[in-house]
Amino acid sequence: MIEIILLQLFVLILFAKIAAIVFEFVRLPPLVGEIVAGIIIGNTFIFDLLQLGTNIEVLSVLAEIGVIFLLFAIGLETPFSDLKRVGGTAILVAILGVIFPFIFGFLLIVSSGFPQIEALFIGAAMTATSIGITARVIKDMNIMNSIESKVIIGAAVIDDVLGLVILAMISGIASGGAMDIVDTVMVAALAVLFVVAVVFVGSGLLPKVRKQVHEFRTPTPVMRARRKISPLAVAIIVCFGLSAAASYFGLAAIVGAFLAGMVFAEFKDLFPIGEQFEAINEFLVPFFFLYIGISVNLSTFGGVAILALMITFVAIATKFIGCGLGAYRLGVKSAAIVGVGMAPRGEVGLIIASVGLTIGSISNDMFSIVVFMSLLTTLAAPLLLTYTFNWKMGRTARF
Amino acid sequence: MIEIILLQLFVLILFAKIAAIVFEFVRLPPLVGEIVAGIIIGNTFIFDLLQLGTNIEVLSVLAEIGVIFLLFAIGLETPFSDLKRVGGTAILVAILGVIFPFIFGFLLIVSSGFPQIEALFIGAAMTATSIGITARVIKDMNIMNSIESKVIIGAAVIDDVLGLVILAMISGIASGGAMDIVDTVMVAALAVLFVVAVVFVGSGLLPKVRKQVHEFRTPTPVMRARRKISPLAVAIIVCFGLSAAASYFGLAAIVGAFLAGMVFAEFKDLFPIGEQFEAINEFLVPFFFLYIGISVNLSTFGGVAILALMITFVAIATKFIGCGLGAYRLGVKSAAIVGVGMAPRGEVGLIIASVGLTIGSISNDMFSIVVFMSLLTTLAAPLLLTYTFNWKMGRTARF
């Protein structure tokens, strides 16, 4: 068994890295190269040759660990103080950026003659911007420190929570027939409580703890033992702890990982773990994007291509309008940057779509459409971001 | 499904790190702490609480990736030139250190009234010193650069190959009744060919390649693309490539990983990847030692404890005599260091034991005995190494 897994890992990493380099060479985002590598592997003889069908669980776990560490690393570059500064705008961007895609996505699918429940799932899958993909696009473009990036990342975190609340509501409708108000409110309340608790502990309590750590310098035996504790190990434990907690609270695990990263962002000087996580992520993150690509089924795709393009257009346009309105106070050009930066859909959208697929509310084709939409919005974002950033910079230069 | 896996990862890492710190604090090898953490998890209510029974495959893959990266990192600190210097001694140490445990292990089991085939498997499981455990003990003791360490590591690589050749022979006996000479010779020839090929390419061809790389500095478009290729990615690809190749050649995958590490040891200045691998390994390696511990079944162990202790004694004594004789030309004290340093058994012994378990040649109890022997030899090695090193240093100090 282990021979075939080693061969799988070898071929998967090889394809992902070659595709990433080729895409980077023609100035496209490397992560799209990794997704395309996954689509190629998943839709050709390579899939059967590698016997990926029988071992897909292993790949899915590596993908999940990869996206968790990715979100941790992104959180690590997002201190609470920064997020608080953009908090109000980010919340508005998130809410409007959820309402517009959900309503117009729903209307598009219903008016195309599909059942209402399927339309609800597709609408929901269009609500949540992918923190993972968005942040990597932003990182690849080297614009992590701009105000727009902070708003985008903050809003992407919040709309993940909103997206999962919507999922809780519509799966209630799909299974029970009527919506269970109590359950929905519970999920929403727990989710908000969890985020608020971590943010409160992170921004309120931790600075005091770190002051204590600074002051407490007497070399007792306990301190000597403590010095053997590697910061990386502590970070990994907290990361998995909060990820597991988040999923038990009904949130996406990646939200917990992101919050864990934000906690450690406050301790960057005491725990210099950024480079170590970059090394781990260079190994693990490609599995996440490969896995998305491998999940795409091209064979039945021809018949639904037009609908996929329409959904993609609605997905980009509604995020642009909704999030742009939310960020209007930053100025027109910054609002445009936020509007296009929120376009990429990913993990949460795919989670919602796969819940719909599992309980039989959406078809296989509709699932492929969601992946296709996620891919195209991801491809479009860096092009649109480059364009809008140049627009803003050009104006700045003229003044 | 993912919630439970995240909880498993969280609890496993937490237990492993706490155990490692506690063991380090009382000056015992941290890896033994990790194995003990695994035994605790595998033999208490925690195992069922974490539902590890249903997801053990995921843990076994993480363990396998962990031990592969560990062996790569060890290879990274073992340049060919060093190994060539100790080559002759290492070969002699390896051969004598395989013959003695195999013969006396076989005799002990047969004389205890067990079938010959079971005795052959236990004898074989006692032949191969664990590179992974040995190297980590050596690293924890900070004696990587001594001549004895080089001999021990070199011999441990070679006796892994010998152990797997013996496995090929006895599984031939167990399945076909009679030994298939052609198959055995094929496996042995392929194994030797593979190691020689990698060593030849590594020590002969690569210095020329790296000279070329140094000289070829014209910034062509290809070179610009090449600069985007991360050394870590190349190392990971080569590591998995050679590991997969090794397992297809009938060798343990870790032998390929070790050889891959040795190749990159020649390029340390061009590819500074040591720290990056250390970060990845801090996450992945504990899974290997946890997995060994979890595989131990304590509930049936009481009945075979005496036999386990006898086998452990024979395992340590025969390696001490065999390897000590092999290293005699280094002087009595260095020979003693090599003799005790070769004691830890691990991966290959456990692989051989699980092959025996799978084809029904050895019992469940006998498998637990092999794990117990592996654990005790690992615990004994650092104590004996410290003692023999002090003995040698004391003499050096007196001269």
Image: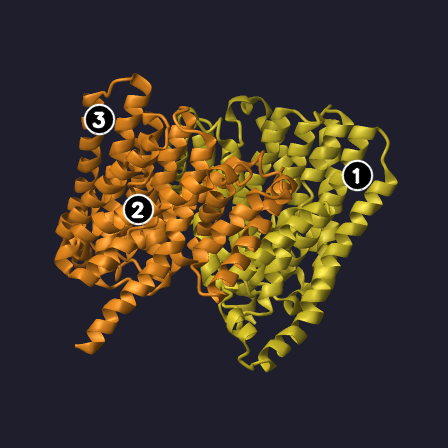
Chain colours: A yellow, B orange
Nearer to me, A337 or A279:
A279
Q: Where is residue B338? Give x, y as percent.
A: 24, 56
How far apart marks 1 and 2 lie (CA) works out to 58 Å
Question: Which residue is at 77% across, 54% downward?
Answer: A192
How far apart marks 3 and 2 lie (CA) works out to 22 Å
Q: Which residue is mark 3?
A: B184
Q: Which residue is mark 1?
A: A169
Which chain is mark 3 on?
B
> Is residue A20 something that shows in the picture?
no
Q: Which residue is mark 2?
A: B129
Helix, strand or loop status at disc 3: helix
Look at the picture and state if A309 lies above or below B158. above
Q: Quadrant of residue A164?
A: top right
Q: Label 2 is placed on what type of residue?
A: Thr
How far apart marks 1 and 3 lie (CA) works out to 63 Å
Apparent side of residue B17 relative to residue B4 in the rendered image (left or right): left
Kindly indicate whether the residues beneath marks 1 and 2 are on one polypeptide chain.
no
Q: Nearer the viewer, mark 3 or mark 2?
A: 2
* N-terminal label among 3 and 2: 2
Helix, strand or loop status at disc 1: helix
Quadrant for the N terminus of chain B, please: top right
| The disc label shown at residue A181, or none | none
Q: Nearer the viewer, mark 1 or mark 2?
A: 2
Q: Label 3 is placed on what type of residue?
A: Thr
Nearer to me, A377 or B290:
B290
Which chain is mark 2 on?
B
Question: Which residue is at 22% across, 20% downward?
Answer: B180
Look at the picture and state if A253 lies above or below A89. above
Q: Where is residue B272? Give x, y as percent.
A: 31, 60
Helix, strand or loop status at disc 2: loop
